Amino acid sequence: MASFVIRRIFALGFVLLFAVSLTFVLLRKAPGNPFSLSEKNATPEAIRQQEFKYNLDGPIWTQCVRYLGLMKKNHGAYSGLLQGDFSPCLKYKDREVGELIKQTLPVSATLGAIAFMIATSVGICLGCNAAVNQHRWIDRASMLGALFAVSIPTFVIAPAAILVFALKLNWLPVGGLNGWSSLILPSIVLSLPFIGYISRLTRTSMLEALTQDFVRTAKAKGVSNARVFYIHTLRVGILPVISYLGPLAASLLTGGLIVESIFSLPGMGGFFVNSVLNRDVFLCCGTVVIYCSLLVIMNLLVDISYTWLDRRIKVS
């Protein structure tokens, strides 16, 4: 197990290096220039000076290597991403990418963590109840609710939730970040589609697990239905759900762009989209580093949890 974890952590560096390099090249190859977009009257000479200042002159591969910190920059330093330098923002002058990430990541991570806990707990409970009560009204009601949660877009649910719970009932704040109460409604809205996905996946996997031979053997030995379900069946039936939770956690922890925008939350989502629109390659690559790191780490935790949930699975 220890050697497996070490190899995965070592591979994380290569995954991040490839993802950041690909993002850098694609964004620099995209039409538009960050300096001409920020200053409409910029002359070609002024643009070249700005590119030289931010080490974005020369061939694309040279720019990328400089950004990673593998080649000396125009001012003779080796500082770069590998040295922990996220570089300055091209759109937001006098602001560092690392500074923006430190300010926005806690908001997105908190929102995503609350939504993750809501989605997993409610989704698994609904899926398990639906599997136990197959073809009954609980099963039909749960799956119908899951279908609605998946089908209705977030940008429709969010304004409706604001209208009902914030404006009509006055239970929760309309938007902004003013304490924990400001995150309750956005977290619920963000988690709703994933509750639908998790509940449907849990129901399907649990129904399949209930038909396995070890379930019939346990019942034949006189084991109670509750013990068979929660001790034996759930450990196996939950595995497909655990696989889905890895990328889900990474996605939710980086926040939801639409939810953050509607509820006026200062998270990472808005900065990431604006970095693409403004061709701010440094800010875009910085957010990609955060997202890829979370994705790889969550997938690693999923693989480790497999061995605990199902003893038949071995990591190597």
Image: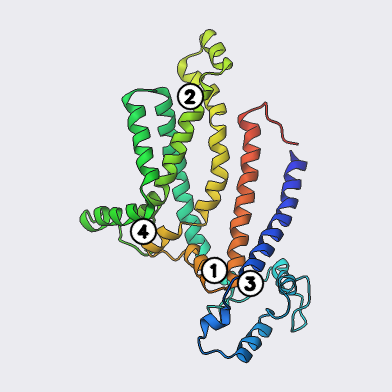
Mark 3 and 1 residues: CB-CB less than 8 Å, in contact?
Answer: no
Q: Nearer the viewer, residue 136 or 178?
A: 136
Q: Residue furthest left?
A: 168
The residue where tag 1 is placed is 276
> Which mark's residue is nearer the viewer, 3 or 4?
3
Q: Nearer the observer, disc 1 or disc 2?
A: 1
Q: Is residue 124 above or below residue 249?
A: above
Whichever of labels 4 and 1 marks the residue nearer the N terminus, that label is 4
Tag 2: amino acid = Leu
Q: Residue at x 61, y 89 (%)?
A: 44
Q: How many marks?
A: 4
Query: Whole-percent x and y of residue 303?
Result: 65, 39
Q: Which mark is residue 28?
A: 3
Q: Earlier in the sequence, mark 3 or mark 2?
A: 3
For the N terminus, which image quadrant? top right
SS state under label 2: helix
Spatial CA distance of label 4 from label 1 is: 28 Å
- Cα–Cα gap, marks 3 and 2: 49 Å
Q: Quadrant of residue 88?
A: bottom right
Q: Which mark is residue 207?
A: 2
